Amino acid sequence: MTVSGTDGTTRRASAVPRQTAGSPVESVLPELRALSWETGIRARADAGLLSVFAELPRLVGKALGISWRADRVRTSVAAVATVGAGVMAAFGLLATQRVLVELFAGGPTPHRVTAALPALGVLTVATGIRAGVGITIGYAQNTLAPRVSREVERGLFEVTTKVRLDAFDEDAFADDMERASRGTDSAIDLVQGAMNLFAGLVSLLAVTVAVIVIHPLLLPALLVATVPNAWASLRAGHQRYQTYTAGSVRRRRLWILHQLMAERVSAPELRSYGLRQFLLDQYDRVMRVETDIQIALARRVTTTTSIGSVIGGLATGVVYGLLGVLLLDGQIPLSAAATCVIAVQTAQRALSTVTFQIDRIYTDGQHFGDYTGFMARAVDYLPDAGGGVAVAPLRELAVRGVGLSYPDRDTPAVNDVTLTIQSGQTVAFVGENGSGKSTLAAMIAALRAPSRGSIEWNGQQLAEYDPAGLRARIAVVTQDYHKWPFTAATNIAIGDAEATPQQERIERAAERAVAHEMIRDLPHGYETLLDRTFAKGQDLSGGQWQRITAARGFLRDADLLIMDEPSSALDARAEDALFQAIRDRRGRATTILITHRLANVRHADRIFVLHNGALIESGTHDELMTTAGRYAELFALQAAGYQSGRSCA
Ligand SMILES: Nc1ncnc2c1ncn2[C@@H]1O[C@H](COP(=O)(O)OP(=O)(O)OP(=O)(O)O)[C@@H](O)[C@H]1O
């Protein structure tokens, strides 16, 4: 069956589900996880005003706590300067009123102006000081921000780089960590929000005090002019957050589609599977819904902000009316009425800062709560300090009744395995996919602690040794190696991160891993950056990367080298050279080799065969072939592939 795309091409219908008219897009793309960085926004969308106010003091306290720990001097300067700015605002208002009193008094104009001069002087000084204090606050806040960021982020990285590997097996931990990362960004916002809130409140208080001093009757007028406006503004904020969260899933679907259609990694498969029309259909469908929602949102926001403005305008009108009545009645002088108008405007500005900061503190506070929560929970995953015993060169490695079960798995990945490896041996772990080879190797490398049994290095349990000492004697080349975004030289040098990188040593390791020539052919040789994110960065093929990771493993010539599938992407010549380099370690250092290419383990001193987590056979190649068990069966299967008459054609 063929279908026509909008590009005019005709192609075979595939298993990809096509959208049918009216079917919801959500049914095609699977359910999305809740996004970590939306936690705060969601919380604010759900929270009523009362709960926001109830939580505010705790959040502000938290913010000041981080700020204080990050830099006491700057925090104190910002706090004192903020109070100073408020006091100057009050002074300014009182001085304004004095100026107006003198200007509205009787007598010739020159006399009135002369009488107003001292108050005018105070006003000028207060305004000047306030401006200076404002600059000080800005400077203190701006220089505090990087310090807060460093304090919080460093704390997070200290934990994420230290927790045990098994922490990452738990979904909850990974989610927790993602949310905590977002929480580090919000720490600065939380601190700045708290300071701005403080500044707004001080300013409000200053205006209130000044107004009461001028005339107590002006206080109710001030309240009428500001409170309804503030309420409307908080309400509008609440609605904005609600609308935002309602559109979140759609925006993320669009983002996923964007990545699928306009990113390098998906480009080849998009073309080879002919996914273009399928993805464009999905995009159109989501966008149609999104456009309707955006129009509805625009209407809603306009209505809300209009209501806010009307309430604010009416309230201000009421105040001005009230002032007029008080003036006509002779209850307040003209100067007080004029000052009140200025006070109302100042208070409205301060209150709009306060309401904005309340929303900001509440949402950022939730994110920061994720961070502090994660830091508290992560303590459970920190490794034991280790026994501190110095690690001697390996003589014998004994695995005794070892088992490991991953979370949410019914069957153990490794089950009651017992084996011994002598120094200088090259041994192989073989077995079908999922038989537990990598898991067992990770326990031997002390990357994972066994759930049952023990692993002994020279007769002493791994847990009793100094962890850094063990790390120095064990090198691991993992199957799922990471492509570090460094130069080729550094990618090899990190195999011994504690030593000062030496070019000659790096090149020797590269030669053993058949990587030297390949690296020299790169545009900048060993200094070529292996990540295309960077200018002049280069991509390597899978096999080229594998050579570099093998070189990383060879760099230290460790007592124990564990190589997990080091040749799965290598060409025949490179593979042969790599295994020659591994054989060269025999008698001198110990190597554990994990591979599915059984021809490469023929010369191993001992081969351990795993099946469903259990050790089912062990011996030399010849012994195992004679036994005619699972190893012999797997070996025969592979060997048959190379014999004439058997091909996939
Ligand atoms: N992090 C993990 N969380 C949960 N289960 C895991 C995890 N890692 C491995 N497993 C499971 O443990 C079992 C053993 O996996 P392991 O990677 O040790 O096998 P392997 O023999 O190295 O496989 P392969 O030959 O495919 O590399 C498998 O069933 C696998 O699905």
Image (cartoon, grey):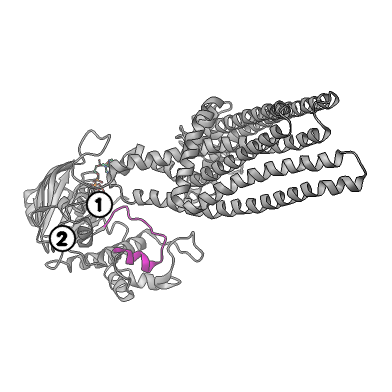
Q: Is mark 1 within 8 Å of ligand 1?
A: no
Q: Residue at x 74, y 49 (%)?
A: 122
**Magenta highlight on residue 490:** yes
Residue sitting nearer the eye, 257 or 92: 92
Residue sitting nearer the eye, 283 or 314: 314
Tell me which corner region of the image, top left, top right, bottom left or bottom right, holds residue 209. top right
**Magenta highlight on residue 193:** no
Q: Can residue 305 be seen in the rendering of this structure?
A: yes
Of circles 2 and 1, the one toward us is 2
Q: Residues within 10 Å of mark 2 (few under 14, many from 20)?
A: few
Image: magenta residue range: 477-495
Residue type of the residue flagged with mark 2: Ala
Residue sitting nearer the eye, 456 or 527: 456
Q: Is residue 577 above or below residue 53?
A: below
How far separated are the C-alphas under marks 2 and 1? 54 Å
In the rendered image, the residue lying farthest to the right is: 108
Q: Residue at x 57, y 35 (%)?
A: 358
Residue sitting nearer the eye, 275 or 567: 567
Q: Residues within 10 Å of mark 1 (few under 14, many from 20)?
A: few
State the residue position of label 2. Answer: 390
State the residue position of label 1. Answer: 646
